[in-house]
Amino acid sequence: MTGDSSQTYSGDITINGSERPPIELHDPADVFVTTDGIGGDLEVRNAEYVFTHQPIDGDITVADAETTLRGDLEDGYVERTDGDVRITDTEDVFIATDAIDGKFSAPGAENVYTDAVSAAATPAEYDVSTVGWQQSGHASDPSVGAYAVGMNHEIELEGVQTDLELYLVGHGHEVSVDGRSAELAIHFLGYDNTVHVGPHLATDVVSDTGHDNEIDAEPYPAADLIEMSRKEAYANAGFGRRKVTFQVPADDEEWCSNCGREADAIIERHLMEAFFLFRIPVWTYEQSTDPAQECEHCSPNTVHAELSPAERRRVFD
């Protein structure tokens, strides 16, 4: 034993391997532990909230600290240490999946949110990987997804064409994803995180370990399901008696009569026989009175997220 090295700090603090373990982080505001952050055990004492994808093992006690970090601390980030860590008298603790090599206990925690979760990739493998406060990231045509640990991150993924994973730890994250023909597997660990999703993407919230997390999905546009508009059908009719078919949005409909599902985009397929003069129907002989409906779930014009990569390539060829 060489004795406790007590170090005083103000503001945010990051543990990255330069501190001699066991380490005690005393009275920070929030603490965020990244994947592969702690090589030993973790003991969290008297936290108000614990959000964890690391299983809680019960009562363990970390040995007396070799390094104590204290002072006017704001937030702590544990990115890497090879030994044990004790966190004392914090507000919120967020512990990512596979964060701790050893055991984990949280005696005295007032509230605990926990799930058994595995991520699809390591932090370095994601297209965007951010840690800290008010970070930002952007990727075009991503292939893996995004990983965020901390507070108030802004991440944008555009041109998405393959299934991705979003792994979000902390609070206040805003993630925007746009593309088509893909599904997002989303993990929330924390609170007040929002994922904004374009209309041609599917989402699957695999884990929501916390509260007040939200998916803000744009509605599927009915126009994308229409093969022939009324205007186009009339324009193609020419002169004389003609039969035309066209599709129009089904106004004020929430349920599709074809498949019985609630839908954002519902269209009606119409059939009409009329006498046309200068592309205008001047006399109608017959028209559909009970038009068939389709929606984004059952229309053959929808590119579904569940298609395989090979099927998607054939669709866009």
Image (spheres, grey):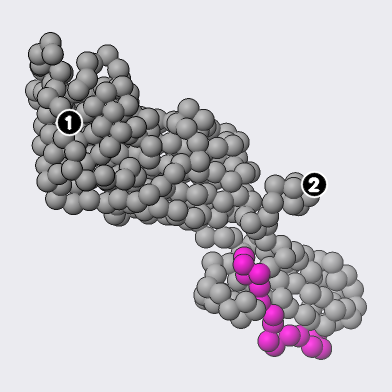
Label 1: how many residues lie within 10 Å, few (<14), some (14-19) or many (20+)?
many
The residue that appears at 50% across and 41% down in the rendered structure is: 120
Q: Position of residue 61 (x, y in %)?
A: 16, 35
Residue behind mark 2: 317
Q: Which mark is residue 175?
A: none
Q: Nearer the viewer, residue 160 or 247?
A: 160
Residue behind mark 1: 62
Residue flagged by tag 1: what amino acid is it? Answer: Val
Q: Rounded to the nearest whole Å, what is the CA distance between mark 2 and mark 1?
A: 59 Å
Label 2: how many residues lie within 10 Å, few (<14), some (14-19) or many (20+)?
few
Residue flagged by tag 2: what amino acid is it? Answer: Asp
Q: Nearer the viewer, residue 10 or 155?
A: 10
226 on left or right of 157: right
Occupied quadrant, residue 282: bottom right
The residue that appears at 12% across and 25% down in the rendered structure is: 64
Occupied quadrant, residue 130: top left
Could you tell me which quadrant the N terminus lies in? top left
Q: Is residue 30 visible?
A: no
Residue 293 inside the magenta-drawn segment: yes
The residue that appears at 32% across and 26% down in the rendered structure is: 39
Dot placed on the residue nearer the N-terminal end, 2 or 1: 1
Q: Is residue 62 above or below residue 66?
A: below
Q: Nearer the viewer, residue 141 or 189?
A: 189
